[in-house]
Amino acid sequence: MSEATPPDVSSAQTRRQVQESRVLGGSRHLRSRQVSTDAGVSLRSARRFWRALGFPEVGEDLQAFTQADVDALQRVSRLVRDGVLDDATALALTRAVGRSVDRLASWQVQLLGEVLAETRAEGVDTPAGDSDPATGASAVDAGEEIGNLAAALAEDFEPLVVYAWRRHLASALQRYQSELMPDPDAPTMLRAVGFADLVSFTRVVRRLSERDLSALVQRFEATTSDVVTSHGGRIIKTVGDEVLFVAWPPQAAAAIGLDIASEMAADPLLPHVRVGLATGAVVARMGDVFGTTVNRASRLTSVAAPGTVLVDDTTASSLAVISGFTCTPLRRRTLKGIGTISPWLLNRSEGRSGTRAAAPSVPGSAPHAVGTQAKVPGEPDDG
């Protein structure tokens, strides 16, 4: 029996180096000290910039950098030298870019991997799977095939990333300039915060294959993202079975919550969701939001029945004068880390405004008397 021909490791390495050069826009030929010298900064400053982008330390003897690394470092250091930014702010902005783009790149590579797996399962060749345009060599494994596809897409997607960033920057500026409480020392703002949580996700995970689970999560993220953005809201983050979003005014968040619940209920491939909404001041930091309002929305989600939307007093009060929504008072609940609150069950109404009970209290008003709210069918018990 003849031995199998060993793979040509050097050839595979060469092809991957070519792929990497296409993605990076040049080959790695510079050492860290060369980068710092060419950029006109100290090696220590160059390393701080590199770490802020989210990359590990690189040995001084390794040719790990390209001319693009020099150019990027020069641009940031020029902002500091010209007095546009101080050093700490420049690093903080760099860190924000690094974290966001790291997630973006990981997400895109994962999506390309899923596309490749699907096309291979269907016996279809991907356009980048036949050969490497730069070397003419066949793509011999999934890693190289994804690399070919990523390299082919990099040039066209780079302008898209810059375009999307500029558009989102303009939107962020517009939001900031119209904030109700613009206080640089306490970066708080009024927002309606919502959580949507897939029901029985742990059981779903146990019965699905990894591929089917990935498809479910991707479908959930796509559906919620479409709903949130269509009403002018923002997705803050997704964590597998849960999505956190913000919107303003509260009726936009209410429409989002109800639409998410109905979309999930209508999709036979997705579980039901629980949704919780709370309105109040939030602290914004690094694209995320924090504070009691966020915690209150999360706790409301945890006690909502499948397929329902629960809101807090402040949200219900805002919706009391808005046609199209009905808030039904539920019995008072004690929520972990929040205390005792009176949830309201949110539904759509036929052109009516207000709630089916007395208007809810707002923060600072007298609390409801225990027992004044009836328990409605489907309301979960304390757990």
Image: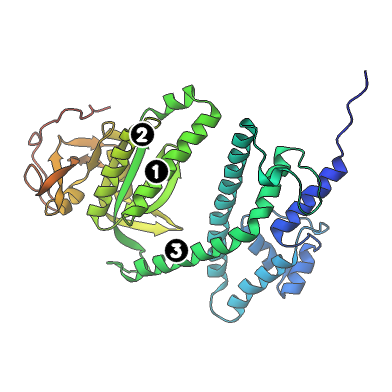
Q: Is residue 169 above or below residue 352?
A: below
Q: Earlier in the sequence, mark 2 or mark 3?
A: 3
Tags 2 and 1 in contact by the CB under 8 Å rule? yes
Q: Secondary structure at mark 1?
A: helix
Residue underneath mark 3 = 168
Q: Amino acid at mark 1?
A: Thr
Q: CA distance from mark 2 to mark 1?
A: 10 Å
In the rendered image, residue 295, in percent from the top left (x then y), is placed at 32, 45
Q: Is residue 52 left or right of residue 231?
A: right
Q: Quadrant of residue 74?
A: bottom right
* Residue 222 visible (yes or no): yes
In the rendered image, residue 270, in percent from the top left (x then y), is placed at 39, 32
Q: Residue at x 31, y 33 (%)?
A: 265
Q: Is residue 90 left or right of residue 274?
A: right
Residue underneath mark 1 = 223
Q: Amino acid at mark 2?
A: Asp
Q: Quadrant of residue 336?
A: top left
Q: Amino acid at mark 3?
A: His
In the rendered image, residue 190, in percent from the top left (x then y), is placed at 28, 59
Q: Quadrant of the C terminus?
A: top left
Q: In the orientation shown, which residue stands out farthest toward the bottom? A: 82
Q: Residues within 10 Å of mark 1 (few under 14, many from 20)?
A: some
Q: Secondary structure at mark 3?
A: helix
* Residue 363 visible (yes or no): no
Q: Secondary structure at mark 2?
A: loop
Colouring of the image: rainbow
Residue underneath mark 2 = 267
Q: Residue at x 42, y 36 (%)?
A: 241
Q: CA distance from mark 3 to mark 1?
A: 20 Å
Q: Quadrant of the N terminus?
A: top right
In the rendered image, residue 147, in percent from the top left (x then y), is placed at 70, 47
Q: Is residue 65 above or below residue 262?
A: below
